[in-house]
Image: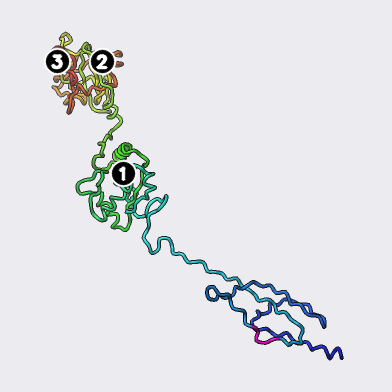
Amino acid sequence: MDRAAAAPADLPDQPVVGDPPAIGVASIPASPGQVRPPAPVPSMPVPPEAGPAGTAPPDPAPPEEALDATAPASIPPPPVVLAAVQPAPIRPASGAGREPQPSGGDGAVLSGHATSGFSPWVSDKLQSYVYLLVDPRTGRAFSVGRGRGDRCFHHVRAARHGGDPEPRGGPADDAGFPMLERIREVESTGREVRIDILRYGLTPDDALLVEAAVHDSLGFRGEPTLGSQRQSAVEVGSRLAKRAKFKRAHQVVLLRVGGRGTDPSYAKARHGWRLGRNWIDPDSVRSPRWAVVVVGNLVAAVHRIERWEPTRSEVAAPMGGSDPGSGPAGGAPVGRYSFAGPVDPELERRYVGKSVAAYLGKGTPGAVTFVWCGPHWVNTPP
C-alpha cells in the first residue's frame, strides 16, 4: 500500500461543544504518524452544579460532534474551573432599626441618651458618686448631686415625664423645682443636658462631703445637706482661733476698732473712745490697766495704759466709736477719750491672735467691753 495514500489526510481540529475557548497558548507541530500531545492549558476547577440534596452531580453531556475515528487522537484540554465566591453577608448598621440594648458585660451605659442608665458592672464600680448637671449651651454646671446606680439620670427622666426629682435625697431645690425647668429649657432647643461624674468610688459620707464642697464652691442656690461653711480665710481663722482667757489680775478694756482689714496701729486705735469718767481714773479699782485692741474678734495689740486724754475735735473717732469728735472750735473736749501707753510684750505673747468672741457676746459687738475691772464691773465669758 502506498504509504502516502494510506495515511489519512490531516483533519483540522474540530471545536468541541462545551469546551472553553482557546486562550492562545503556542503549540509545537507534530510530525506525521506521531500523536500530538495536548497543549498545556491552565485551568481552575469549577464546582459542579449542585443537585438535589444527597445526590451526586450529573455527568457532563457528551460533545455533539465526535472527531473522525481515522484522525489522530486528540485529547481535549481540561475544562476551565472557576471557584465559586460566596458574597459577604450584608450586616445592618450598628443600632439601625432597633432600640439600644443594655450591655451584658462591662459596657458603660445603656445608650448615649441622658435618660439611659449604667450597666450593673459599671454601677458596682461606681459605688457612691457625685455628679453635675451641665448646660450644653454654656458648659456650666447648674446642679450638683450624689447617689448610686442610675441616680444621676433621674432628674432628666423627671423633667420629661413628671415626678419628684429627689426620690432618694440629693441636691436641694426650691419648691418650684427650678432644676427641672432648666432641663426642659435646654431640651426645648433640641439638645440634651450633659451629666458629668465628678468623683466616684466614694463612701456615702465622703460623697456627702464632696457634694457640700462643690455646692459651696459653685455658689448654687439652697443649702447643701451638711450646711454651708463657705467664708473668707480671715473669718475661718477668727472662728477657729484659740479662745483668749484673761486672768483675774489683768484688768483690761477691749477696744474693738472694726471688722477685718481695719488698721489696728496705735496712732489710729488710741483715739475717740466714749468712756465714763469713773473708768478713766487711774486711782480707781475699777479702771482698766491694759487696752486690748480688737479687730473683728481677734486681739491685735495690747497696750499698758498710762493715762487717758480727752479727744479733741480735730481727732476723728475710730471705726469702733460712734461718731467723730465734734466740739466747739478751738479743740474743746467732746466726751471722748484717748489712751496713752506703750505695748506690753508679755501680754501680747499671751493674747495676740486669740479670739475674744466669748467676751463680746451675741449679736453686734459693742465698741468697748470691760473685763475684770472692779468687783462690780466684771465681764466673764458665758
Q: In percent of the image, x 23 and y 42: which residue is there?
A: 222
Q: Nearer the viewer, residue 25 or 74?
A: 74
Q: Which residue is mark 1?
A: 147
Identify the residue position indicated by label 2 in the image.
303
Give yes or no for residue 65 being in the magenta stretch. yes
Going 73% across and 88% down the picture, which residue do you hit? 68
Dot label at residue 139: none
Query: Mark 3 falls on what kind of element?
Result: loop
Query: What x and y, as percent, mark residue 366?
Result: 17, 24
- The numbered mark, 1 or 3, whose residue comes first in the sequence reads 1
Q: Nearer the viewer, mark 3 or mark 2?
A: 3
Q: CA distance from mark 3 to mark 2?
A: 20 Å
> Sequence order check: which comes first, mark 3 or mark 2?
2
Decide which of tag 2 and tag 1 comes sooner along the chain: 1
**Lateral position of residue 35 relative to residue 267, left or right:** right
Q: Where 138 sits versus 210, above or below? A: below
Q: Helix, strand or loop at disc 1?
A: strand
Q: Quadrant of residue 274?
A: top left
Q: Residue at x 74, y 81 (%)?
A: 74
User: Which is in the foreground here, disc 2 or disc 1?
Assistant: 1
Q: Which residue is mark 3?
A: 377
* Three-letter amino acid code of the residue under disc 2: His
Tell me which segment is drawn in magenta: 62-66
